[in-house]
Image: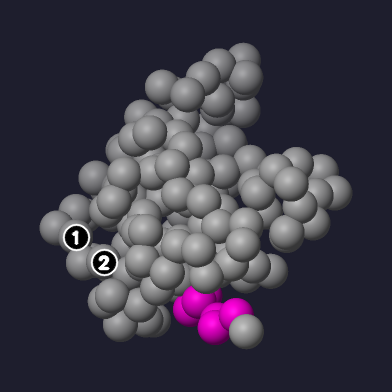
Amino acid sequence: MKVLVSTKETQGQRPNDFCWVPEGEIVKYGFDCDGDAVDGSCGCRRSLVGLECSKATTTMKVAQVDFTKGELKAMLRESLIRDGWMDCYKTATTKRDFLTREWAAFEHLLEVAKNLPVGTIVERREEVGPRRVVA
């Protein structure tokens, strides 16, 4: 299965690039600041977050992995538990609803990866897609 992973390839192409995620770590959407612009000082709207380290990167690439969707879902759930996000929800129903929303967002990234060749460098601007050349 194809997923998006962190990479340092093309880092520095944009002056506000950063990569705090170990090379090759699977990434997911993080949480965005209200009203921050894509190129805002926070960087939350132009980055994805490592499943294990919970840090962000502005450069990702498509990679082939030997995980099933079930294994990826378990990894996402463990990440949310470890980072304390599941503690924000008090009932089983609200926890399940939150996990369902997070999985839907992760599946969107799986769909992006599925439609691109392995090795394609990806960035998040308004959408997640192949990295555009910056003049």
Q: Circle 1 sits on which residue? A: 65
Q: Residues within 10 Å of mark 2 (few under 14, many from 20)?
A: many
Amino acid type indicated by mark 1: Val
Give percent across and percent down for residue 108. 50, 64
Question: Which residue: 29% across, 51% down?
Answer: 23
133 is higher (above) or lower (below) than 128 = below
User: Dividing the image into 4 quarters, which one contains the N terminus?
Assistant: bottom left
Q: Which residues are magenta?
A: 129-134
Res. 63 mark: 2
Mark 1 or mark 2: which is in front?
2
Res. 54 mark: none
Q: Residues within 10 Å of mark 1 (few under 14, many from 20)?
A: few
The extreme right residue here reads 35
Is disc 1 in contact with disc 2, using a CB cutoff of under 8 Å? yes
Amino acid type indicated by mark 2: Ala
Q: Is residue 4 left or right of residue 69?
A: right
The residue nearer to you, when weighing 53 against 29, is 53
User: Dividing the image into 4 quarters, which one contains the C terminus?
Assistant: bottom right
